[in-house]
Amino acid sequence: MIQASVPNPYSPTPLPADPVDRGRRDPEETMSRDQIESLQFERLRWTLHHAYENVPAYTEHFDAHGVHPSDFTELADLAKFPYTDKEFLRKNYPFKAFAATGPELRRIHASSGTTGQPTVVGYTDTDLDTWARLVARCFRASGIRPGDRVHNAYGYGLFTGGLGAHYGAERVGAAVIPMSGGQTEKQVQLIRDFEPSAILSTPTYLLTIADGFRKAGIGPKDTSLKTAVLGAEPWTEEMRREIEQTFGVDALDIYGLSEVMGPGVAGESVETKDGSHVWEDHFRPEIIDPFTDEVLETGRPGELVFTSLTKEALPIIRYRTHDLTRLLPGSTHPGHRRMGRITGRSDDMIILRGVNLFPSQIEELALQLPGLSPHFTLTITRPDRMDEMTVTIERRPEATMEQAQADGQALRGQIKTTIGSSCTVDVVEPDSLARSSGKLKRIYDERPKG
Ligand code: DLL
């Protein structure tokens, strides 16, 4: 049994026996802001004690910063506690940041990241239950209902996307098709044969599936799909429009990260399509200035930081996500704040001759030009002493090369005027760039290292 000197205030409500009832909102979804904040206070108090008393890495971390869980007397006191980041988890690889390694530990996932050593995360039974509930909450908000059939194209395995989405779909009362990522021809066949009403995928892999339909001589609009719940990589409103028009679906955002739980930390409502609500009964989000580390008020853009409120196996305190966005007041779930779109990750930011630039800005501009497709890469080189960027982008099959090249020049001009960077735009034939089967790599940095 995991114990801390303050009692754990979280006790999950039992599941409804009738699967049809799983289509109802959780009581916490309708709480007011005041109710959420008093819940957050109680749960944070427990989390800080739990982390300090059960994870030596946190004991050391708090001691080194001269803070103790008893210093937490109101919500604003969270700012007294030190940040954590990927480095904190790497240093404590594999299990030294865990509060549970014995029989309470039920599942381990890992995210590979870009730098070799994976980040390892763990779950108790209660953590897995919470995860399924919150993913189910996202799917319900997206319009998925008991009795729906859901095609899950997120990768299964150590990645949290596949299994996280899987248990959430079962929890909402749907039937899951556990397809995983890749094998695009098979995806097309199963979507035709099993007639799912919803698909779960990364936005760029859904574009690959759309190509697969076209190659099979089927219009992507002529499928049973009505809803697409997309996440795991940044995407723009222009991409939403592209996907909705291609498949004739409602495309909704789902956000999450392994260290904080996996998919389902935040989800978007089909009625409003106005950004993902962070489930604030389980996570306390903050936005900070990534350079000064100062906490910013709701509405200001900066780096997203999360503290878990109920997690047992891997409590996470003030975890710096590197994701850049802002918090907005709740809409369909007034007690929970929404996130704006993730504009990029601070570690994905291209600094081109002093100008900061994200791939999502290029996506936004390119998709406003009729001859250009959403398939593009950014290559950074240093031929001389100056950095140069080439946008390599496929023309749309229905546009001529001449039209697409004119749009390519227009794109170059817009990148210059709206972002402030000079670059080269190279328009290429459809299907010449590598396709994603999960998270797409858009940036190729070919500058000499060191
Ligand atoms: O990508 C969890 C997930 C799976 C979320 C499936 C949604 C759907 P990680 O592999 O740990 O976990 O990667 C987390 O992916 O910090 C963001 O940079 C990015 N990301 C996730 N969701 C979104 C989103 C999963 N909706 C990292 N929009 C995060 C933009 C996203 N970026």
Image: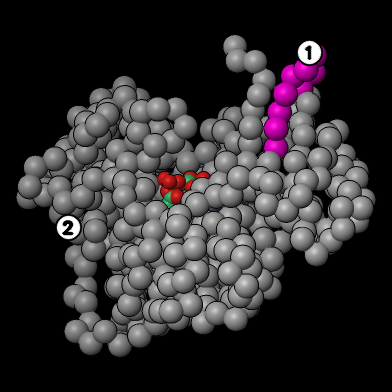
Q: Which amino acid does label 1 sit on?
A: Arg
Task: Look at the image and say whether residue 226 sits in the magenta stretch.
Answer: no
- Tell which of 94 and 149 is nearer to you: 149
Q: Which of marks 2 and 1 is nearer the N terminus?
A: 2
Q: Is residue 422 visible?
A: yes
| Left or right, residue 364 beside residue 83 | right
Classified by dominant secondary structure, the portion drawn in magenta counts as loop
Return the residue found at the far front: 216
Secondary structure beneath disc 2?
helix
* Magenta-drawn segment: 378-387
Which residue corresponds to mark 2?
Answer: 125
The total of numbered circles placed on residues is 2
Quadrant in the picture for residue 9: bottom left
Disc 2 Cβ-to-ligand 1 distance below 8 Å: no
* Of labels 2 and 1, the one closer to you: 1
Give the percent coordinates (x, y) of residue 327. Answer: 57, 55
Q: Label 2 neighbourhood size at 10 Å, few (<14), some (14-19), many (20+)? A: some
Which residue corresponds to mark 1?
Answer: 385
Asked if the residue at tag 1 contacts the one at tag 2, i.e. Cβ–Cβ closer than 8 Å, the answer is no
Would you place residue 255 above or below residue 90 in this image?
Answer: below
